[in-house]
Amino acid sequence: MDSLPALRFVHRVMLITSATLALSGCKKELPVAPVVPDALTIVQGNTQAGQAGLDLPTPIVLRVTDKSGLGMPDISVTLAIGEGGGIVTPASATTDARGEVKAKWTLGPRAVNQTLIASAPGVEPVTIRATGLVPSEIIIAQGNNQTAKVGLALQNAIVVRVLAAGNVAMVGVPVAFQVTAGGGAFSPQSIVTNSLGEATVKWTVGLLPGANSAIVTVSTLSPVTLSATATP
């Protein structure tokens, strides 16, 4: 008879335990909200200046972040030219482990104000801006106002320099030389500027004594006049 209360206690504990386990098995896991992009930001490469038609010196880097400011990998980012023409490579990319993508921007050949639009799913697009440097001035660096005997080349080569605003040398710009008086010839008659923005040619004066003149032309810039004198 003494064991009856003990048996009842054990039975009660078993019932409570079974009920607890049954209830715990019925619990539903709460859904976890997906992490989504919160912002697309420019890490580097904004507001650069570079020669129109060439690559900007610094690559464009963008980052996609969540609400905590952490970089999000495997997010697609699209880049498209806004103003100015040009090419961006690649035009789309997937963010790396830091949430970043990198691209090369080749500016359009003529525009000063140029833009690139970057976008990612669920966030506001961002605009990257650049200034395209275009030829603005032709400078005679060497060889003007020389004298040579008729039919001979001037002792010093003619060197002209093509510059953009801020005295930035323009690379690969076509330069043309044309005799306007006195005869003679240039060799070569046209050439592109080197890494210093310079074009170098030889000028042979005409066969008659007297003044020789020529013009140097670059795109839409005003021509620059060269002078020489042919002696007997």
Image (cartoon, helix red, strand yellow):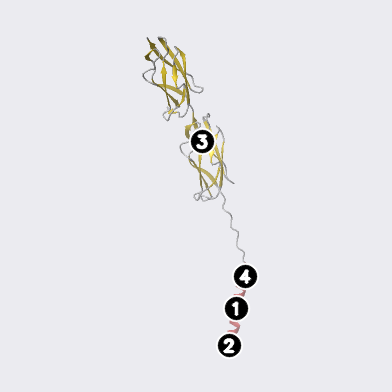
- Label 1: element kind: helix
**Residue 178 location in percent, x, y?**
47, 17
**How many angstroms separate mark 3 from mark 1 (CA)?**
76 Å
**How many angstroms separate mark 3 from mark 4 (CA)?**
65 Å
Identify residue for label 1: 14
**Residue 75 location in percent, x, y?**
55, 48
Quadrant (top left, top right, bottom left, bottom right) of the N terminus:
bottom right
Asked whether residue 122 is in view, the answer is: no
- Give the side of residue 156 with respect to residue 165, left or right: left
Determine whether 113 is above or below 138 in the image: below
The label nearer to you, 3 versus 2, is: 3
Query: What amino acid type is highlighted by mark number 4?
Result: Leu
Identify residue for label 4: 23
Disc nearer the start of the sequence (1/2): 2
**Residue 214 location in percent, x, y?**
45, 16
Identify residue for label 2: 3
**How many angstroms separate mark 1 from mark 4 (CA)?**
14 Å
Determine whether 10 is above or below 28 in the image: below
The label nearer to you, 4 versus 2, is: 4
